[in-house]
Image: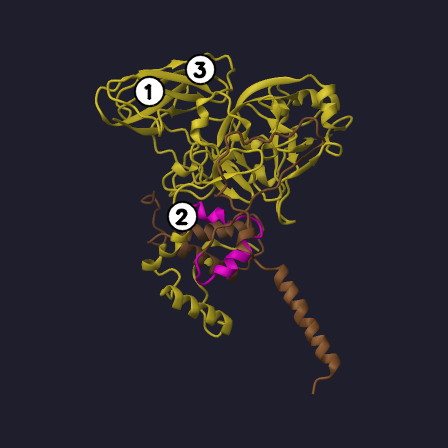
Chain colours: A brown, B yellow
Amino acid sequence: MITRKQLLALVGFVILGAIIIWIGRDDPSQRPKIEEQPPVQTPVTQPSTQSDFNQITLPHDDPEFPPGPGRELFLARCTVCHSLRYITMQPNFSKKVWAKEVAKMINTYKAHITGEEAREIINYLATVKGTDQDGASNSKLK
Amino acid sequence: MILKPEELQDPKPEGDAVSRRRFLQLASAAAMSGAFSACHSQYTNTSFISVPPGQTVARFPEKAELLLLTDRPPQLETPIHYFREDLTPNEAFFVRWHYEGIPTYIDLRTFRLKVGGHVDKPLTLTLDELKHQFDATSIVAVNQCSGNSRSLFLPRVPGGQWKNGAMGNARWTGVRLKDLLQRAGVKSGAVDVSFGGLDEAPLFNMSKFVKALGIEHALSDEVLVAYSMNDKPLPMLNGFPLRLVVPGWYATYWVKSLASIKVLPEKFHGFWMDKAYLIPKNADAVETPENLATDTVPINKMNVRSLIVSPDLPDLVRAGATAEIQGIAFDSGSGISKVEVSIDGGKNWQAATLDSDALGKYSFRRFRLPWTPQSSGAYQLASRAYTNDGKFQRVFDQWNKSGYMRNVIEQREVTVI
C-alpha cells in the first residue's frame, strides 16, 4: 500500500511534470516565420543617431530535414554552430565532397564531432544532398 | 587529432559494435525510406523535396526583403534590381557574417574602439571622440564579397551560394585609419595591422575573425574607419557602429563592428589570413579540380567586373522599340576605361557609353547602350569591361575550389516580344 505521503508526492510530481511539458511545448504558431511576412514598401528602421543604443532581434527559422539514419546526429552536431540553411543552400555534392566539408568542420573549425559520428553525418548528407555517382564530377548539376 | 576525409567515407565494419539502439535506428529509417543503405545510388535525393525549390526571401532588422542564404549567422543577398541605382541603399546592402555570435546590441556609452599594439600611446575612443577629434572624410566604394557569384562556378563548389548580389556600392564616411595610427604613434619596425570586430566564434577553440593589412596599406589615405554609410549610421548587420573600409579590396577585409586595431612588429598569422580566404597565386586565381594550386596567397584586390542590370525580368522588350541596356562596371581602383556590350552571346561587340565618373574610381561606373531589336526571340546579352591599367574581362574556364574572384563575362538571356 502506498502511504498518503507517497500519494501526495506522486501527485506533486505529476503536476510538476505537466507544468514542465506545458512550458517546454513546441507550439508551431509561436515560431517566428521568415517567409510569410508581408512586403513593406519602406521597411527601414534606421538606428537613431540620437540614441545611445542600437538593438536588433534576429529572426530564425530552420528548414525541416527528412528522416533517415544519422538525421538526429546531424541536427545535434551541426546546429551547434550554424543554421541548417548552410546545407540546404548547397547544391548536391558527392559523398567525397561532403566528407571533405565535414572534415573541414572538425579539423579547421574544431567542431566537437568524433570520427564515428562524422561517418554517420556524412552518410546522411550524401543521402539528402548527394549526387548519383559517388565521387563523380558535379558539373552536370545546375 | 586530424581526421582525413577519405577515412570518413567508408562506414566502419559494423559487427558487434552496432548497438541495439543504432540497429533500431537503422531498421526504422530503412523501413520509412525503403532504402537500407544511405549511399545506395537509386535512393539519393528523393527525400529532399520538403525543401522548397527556388529562392527564399527574408526580412531582417533594418533590412528590406533580401535573398536568404542563411539565417544563423545571417547571410543575405541583394536582389540585382537595386544595382539600377548608383548607391546601394543601406536596407538592401548584402550581409555576410562568419560566426553566429554577431553583435545584436550596442550601447554607445560603453562601446570603445581600441588602437594598440606596437604604438607609443594606445588609444581608447568612444564613437563621439572619433567623430569630433578627427577629420571626417568620405569615399564611394564597392564592397564585394570574395565569393560573390560563387554559385555560377562549374563544377559547383561548397560555400555561400551567392549569385551576383554579394556586393554593393556606398558612400562611406569616417576617419582615416592613418590619422588614428598617427595619433597613437606607430613605432618603428611595424609590419602589419590587425582588425577585430565584436563578433565571436561559437566554440572557444575556434579562431576569432581577425584580418590584417600591411602597415603601408594601413597608412595610405584611402583606408577608413567608417561610422556612416550613405550618410546614415551603418545598419547593425553591416557593422554598426564602425566598419573598416578598404577601397578596391574584397569585403573580407572590411571588418564589421570594428573594436580593436592592433599594430604588429611582425607578420600577422591568424587563421583568417593564413588558412582561409586564400587564392591560387596567379592573375585570375585559377586552378582545376584535378590540379589544385599549391602556391596560394591571401585574397586582396578585386578584379574587373561588369554586370548588365537592365533589361531584366519583368521588363518587356518589344521588337522595333528602343530599350536601354544598362549595367555597372568596377575594378580595384584603376578605373573603367571602356565597356562593350554584345546582344549575340559575344560574337559582336559595341562600345557602351559610360556615365560620369563623379563618384570616383572605386565606385560602380554605369554604362548604357540603346538597343532596338528588330525581331522577337531570345537574345544573349553580355558585357565586358576594360580598365585604365589594361585589364579586361574574358570568357574562360575560371575556377577555383573556394569560388573566389569570379569575373568572367556574364551572359543574360532576354526575350524580345
Image quadrant where residue A1 sits: bottom right
Mark 3 neighbour class, 10 Å CA radius: few under 14, some 14 to 19, many 20 or more: few
Residue that numbered label 2 is attached to: B52
User: Disc 3 designates what residue?
Assistant: B388
Q: Position of residue B77 (x, y in %)?
A: 48, 35
Residue B365 appears in which quarter of the rendering?
A: top left
Q: Can residue A66 be seen by looking at this rendering?
A: yes
> Between tags 2 and 3, which lies in front?
2
Local secondary structure at mark 2: loop
> Depth-wise, is mark 1 or mark 2 nearer the camera?
2
User: Residue B118 appears at what percent x and percent y?
Assistant: 73, 29
The residue lying furthest to the right in this view is B121
Q: Are marks 1 and 3 on the same chain?
A: yes
Please name whichever residue, B363 or A102, is drawn nearer the observer in this view of the structure. B363
A20 sits left or right of B376 in the view: right
Q: Earlier in the sequence, mark 1 or mark 3?
A: 1
Q: In what element is the residue under mark 3?
A: loop
**The N terminus of chain B is located in which quarter?**
bottom right
- The span shown in magenta is A66-93
The amino acid type, in three-letter code, at marker 1 is: Val
Establish if B223 lies above or below B148.
above
Instruction: Of the two numbered discs 2 and 3 on the same chain, state the one appearing first in sequence.
Output: 2
Which residue lies under the disc numbered 1? Answer: B341
